[in-house]
Amino acid sequence: MAAKSARFLVPFALLAVWLAVGAFLGPFAGRLGEVSTNDQAAFLPRSAESTRVAEQQRAFRQDETLPVIVVWTTQGTAAPARAAQATRALASLAGTPGVVGRPSPALPSEDGRALEGVVALRPDLGKRLPDTLDGIRAAARHVDGATVQLAGPAATQADLGDAFAGIDGLLLGVALVTVLLILLLVYRSVLLPLVVILGAVFALGLACAVVYVLADHGVVRVDGQVQGILSILVIGAATDYALLLSARFREELTRHPDRFTAVRAALRQSWGPVTASAATVALALIALLLSDLTNNRALGPVGAIGIVCALLSTLTFLPAVLVLLGRGAYWPRRPSAGDDAETAHRLWRRVAAAVDRSPRRIWAVCLVGLLAAAAFAPSLASKGVPLSETFVNDAPSVAAQDTLDRHFPGGSGNPAVVVTDAAGLPRVLAAARATDGVASATAVTEGGRPGTGAPLVAGGRALVDVTLRASADSDDARAAVGRLRTSVHAVPGAHALVGGYTAQLDDTLRTAERDRSLIVPVVLAVIFVILAALLRSLLMPVLLVATVALNFFATLGVSSLVFRHVFGFSGTDPSVPLYGFVFLVALGVDYNIFLMSRVREESLRHGVREGVTRGLVSTGGVITAAGVVLAATFAALGVIPLAFLVQIAFIVAFGVLLDTLVVRSLLVPALVRDIGALAWWPGRLSRGAREQEPARDGSGMEAVR
């Protein structure tokens, strides 16, 4: 009796540890916002020209600032009296908390129907930014008969803060409720779904605590996008891994009456595929450290930490609870010794029979369909999105920018910035003004703003503000910046550099293209090595990597059509294809790892042909459930009203479903069935396994008995 009781000490100890993790570290899931930043200037390409300009600009001012552009519009002409009122309203803000220096005077538009002025704010206002903007808005309303709007980087940052406000509560709640409902339908039991959800929450709390500490010490960066993806990634991964382990535990309970024996057997058979799966995703995320974009680099270690925590919860918390609950975990459908597992897989027995009967026809049809979808992938424009499409809903800063664009030059209030040697300033000004697409170019003076007076010089360098004719986030503006760079770079001895918002967009696009060409081969190589080590084959990893890559391109093709014709997006953020690739390829390989590790296990006992059938039958239901859970979890990102996250949500959710229902269920099994033992070359199966060819009655059902 004492010996039997002692066996429960380890499960109880593990449960106690995880309960402590949940109690003390769980609150960190809601505190990541304290160490996150949504300042887009902090996520520029590290080596780009625009980044060097931003660094050199610091020498020209005591404090960095975050500008907000105040826009007044009137029904008639903006009379001089209104301009004077607007200037006085802005001047009244000097010295108020958060405002740096003296605001600019209010300047009229060429059509005489609008006014604009710039207020410089401290960049570290954080949660005080909305209140500061409210104060500016209230002061600006003291202009008779005018409507006030706020545009510029500060207003955009405030709207981003509002959009990300749902990260801690709404996103997490939607994801957890969605997963819980799916698990209840899959398991048709009460306790196990709650246990799985609890394990995912504990993993998320641990991951957030680790990330919080690292971010607080400056080791990693966190923004709203990274925070949201971390939550979804941990919940989805922890749930998927738990589904695989708990399904194997249920299967072992039908063979072993003792719960400890069943848990040990389930762990022995599951830990390898689950660990390989986690390693695939974690290392694919770590590969993002090769990116020159800071926000990509931020997601790499943060996401990898989340995956490791999900794996740790699955291999410690879940087995401990399963031991303590035993068959009661599946109540009211408790498994018992001798249950016929195949009766629970009628659908997958039919699928396996079809694959066994006509493998070549099935993989050919799947291949044609995927290739047809992939043909549209090149039409997915990844050149960034205009400000008007950054937010899914109507954002005040977007409406204000539209107003600004209607009455002022497109780049007004958001100029390109040229840093040049002071000696070459006159020639750089002349070259900039002569550039096609430039509305004006003015040296920044001692007062800190363009205008009359002596140019502001620091360390022998001077600043030029260049207003573009096109909107700062447009293709025309990026083209104008390219011409501007050519012009000022050609000025002898000036050593001129071009930065500013438009230049940052252009540099980000070019860096994203470079990142994809570098990171994609690295991720594929990492996945190949892990698959080769797990499956002890060289040809099989090539086959699996090729199919998930095809699934990725097919998903991009479908996404290009949906984004353009359903959502109305003109393009995607440059990082979207890279994020989609990392998640889809790594997660797609996950399901193939689960399937093919079981196929290998069965093939060693029964031959390759029956191994494919048995592996598909035994894993089909649980892997499909895992895919649906993961797709639904990523789809929850769509509740955050940002185009970037909506696009990621669709690409990953659709791609996971396509991979689960077509690639893993039909294409891969059919290919392996058709190729036979050669698919495992040069491993043991290709050398020694003999195909078993039982007689069939025409229905193909003999192969699955």
Image (cartoon, helix red, strand yellow):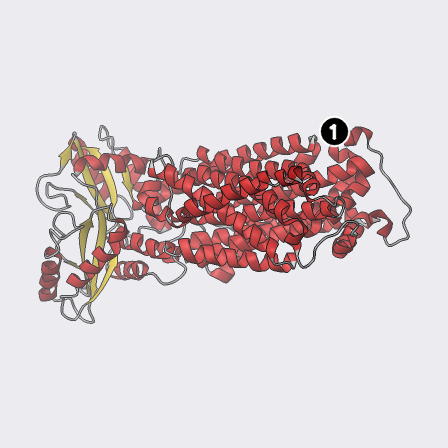
| Residue 672 in sight here | yes
Give the residue drawn at x 18%, y 50%: 98
289 and 384: which one is in front? 289
Q: How many marks?
A: 1
In the current view of this chain or complex, which residue is farthest to the front? 1
Query: Which residue is denoted by mark 1 in the rendering?
Result: 683
Q: Would you say 91 lies left or right of 270 here? A: left
Q: Position of residue 617 (x, y in %)?
A: 75, 49
Q: Amino acid at mark 1?
A: Gly
Left or right of 549 on screen, residue 123: left
The image quarter in which residue 248 lies: top right
| Image position of 55 (left or right of 448) | right
Residue 246 x %, y % = 64, 47
**Can you say which quadrant of the picture contains the N terminus?**
top right
Judge whether 356 appears above or below 641 on screen: above
Position of residue 646 measured from the top left corner of the image (x, y, whole percent): 47, 55
- Is residue 571 among the parts visible in the rendering? no
**Is 627 displayed left or right of 123 in the figure?**
right
Question: Percent from the top left, x then y, of residue 6?
Answer: 62, 38
Please rate how many residues cluster around mark 1, counting C-alpha atoms within 10 Å: few if below 14, some from 14 to 19, many from 20: some
Residue 483 in the image: above or below residue 412? above
446 vs 202, nearest the viewer: 202
Q: Nearer the viewer, residue 404 or 495?
A: 404
Label 1 sits on a secondary structure element that is loop
